[in-house]
Image (cartoon, grey):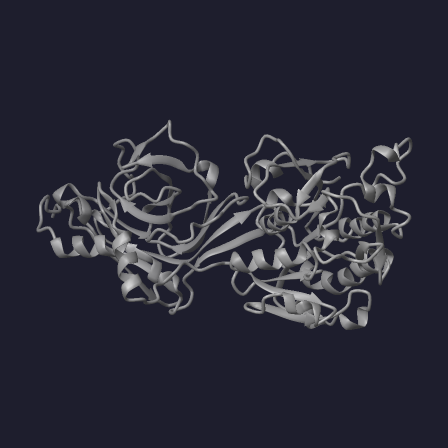
Amino acid sequence: MPEQTSSSWDAGRFVRTLAFFETIPLLGSFSWVRESLERLFPQSSPQPERVETGKIILVVGATGGVGKRVVQRLRSQGYAVRALVRNPSTAQQIPSEGIQLFPGDVTRPETLTADLMEGVVGVISCLGPRVQPVEGDTPDRAKYYQGVKFYQPEVVGDTPEAVEYRGVQNLLAMAKPHLAALPTYGEKMIFDFRSSDSPALQVWGALDDVVMGGVSESTLEWHNGAAAFEGNVSTANSGGFASLRTRNLTPALDLTGYEGIDLRLRGDGQRYKFFLRSDDRWDGVGYAHSFDTVPDLWMTVSIPFNQLVPVFRARTMNDAPGLDLSRICSLQLMLSKFEYDGKLNPRFRAGRFQLQIESIKAYSSKLPPRWIMVSSAGVTRPDRPGLNLEEEPPAVKLNQQLGGILTWKLRAEDLVRQSGLPYTIIRPCALTEEPDQQRLRFDQGDNLKGKVSREDIAELCVQTLKLPQAHNCTFEVAEGEGGCEPGDWVCLFDQLQPDR
């Protein structure tokens, strides 16, 4: 019997859909109402899972000028942090919330126990010997302004060889077995539906053709280790689609550096669509990909970002801007009668349907770095033939006076490059206490001169954790005019070549 072409529309379900997504079609979001009510009646509301939570970043040199800023920025961006500290008294300057202080001294390998690495997925090394003015440090912390005003420096305490080289050597020997056993490809869990109490179940809601006058109806239920997108799709009332969509994610999801999405699912033989949106409007452009399922077979559907098609109400939009991977506002799964531009879905059938979803992940063929090292510009210059020292920064001129500090940094870099771990080595020019959000210049070959804020270097370290483009790269960085806007990390890293 052919399906009825008209049926009773459910106004109540229409209102419930609008309430869940906090929006009015053609008018936009009314999330301001919710925000006003929450100020009057505070309550907790489900938030998207943060993949960083519970995955620990180890920060070494966490009490130094860059290290303490790295810790703060990691915490502000949702990472769990473990700080290796030698002196508990100096560690008091590190905020304690969400941070594990782990006692240990890189110059004494017996203090670096295996439990230091438990749960760690990346290391940011800001190691360095203590350098201060010859006459002693000043109340205004003059040593932190070396990039602006010169002072005569000296090394106090452990030598550069002990800290920069032996320390990295000891730390690598302890950490490498753990880090080398982690997955060998880049992966970011976005939504994990394998548990019945997953917060992800509260973020997704049904968005069916009831919003267009149709009568299709779907639900999201959990059973047998997966979320089930199921229901009845009908072409009555000129309808013909059922879908699941997330609320607008807060904060927006950053998939910078990843290459695509992996959907782990089991379908019913029909063709479905997957959407990403970098626009938080209700009815903006979506970036879509269609995929076929095999009845009752678990499968992984890989969707490269470069194969997503910009669409607006199933019409392709050839003049649409590219998808902004740094700002993914919502995700959607759909079963529709239509493909694109009026073409029909060849595998669509009206009636009951079910699509089980176990997980949604981002993937990359390259790993973001497991080991990020803050080194220094100039490390190759002290022994460079024909170098005019008078034209070089103070650190290069005073290398021998400071115990060969740049020489030992370079040898430590070599240890990291030879470790086999995915790494990034950052060589900042003279460090200052100036504000962040400056234009940055990257270069390779160790010829760059200038200055750069510790704030910008700290943010660079944190952003590098997310970027497969940073895989096995060594580069110098300074402030200055360049081709990229402040904070456009992908643009900066796209200029680099991996180390040979």
Viewer can see residue 428: no
189 w.r.t. 41: above or below: above
Residue at screen point 73% across, 60% down? 176
Drawn side of residue 199 relative to residue 420, left or right: left
Residue furthest to the front in view is 139
Left or right position of 120 against 155: left
Q: Is residue 100 above or below residue 48?
A: below
Q: Residue furthest top?
A: 319
Percent of width and height locating residue 468: 60, 45
Q: Nearer the viewer, residue 109 or 376?
A: 376
Is 315 situated left or right of 406 in this image? left
Query: Taking the image as drawn, is residue 52 in sight?
Result: yes
Instruction: Tell whether 274 sits left or right of 444.
Output: left
Q: Is 295 or 68 nearer to us in this picture?
A: 68
* Image height of 67 relative to 222, above or below: above
Q: Position of residue 229 (x, y in %)?
A: 31, 57
Residue at left offset 8%, top offset 51%: 8
Quarter of the image holding residue 266? Answer: bottom left
Q: Which residue is painted at 55% across and 67% down in the image?
A: 98
Q: Residue 489 location in percent, x, y?
A: 57, 41
> Percent position (x, y) of residue 147?
73, 43
Q: Quadrant of residue 384?
A: top right
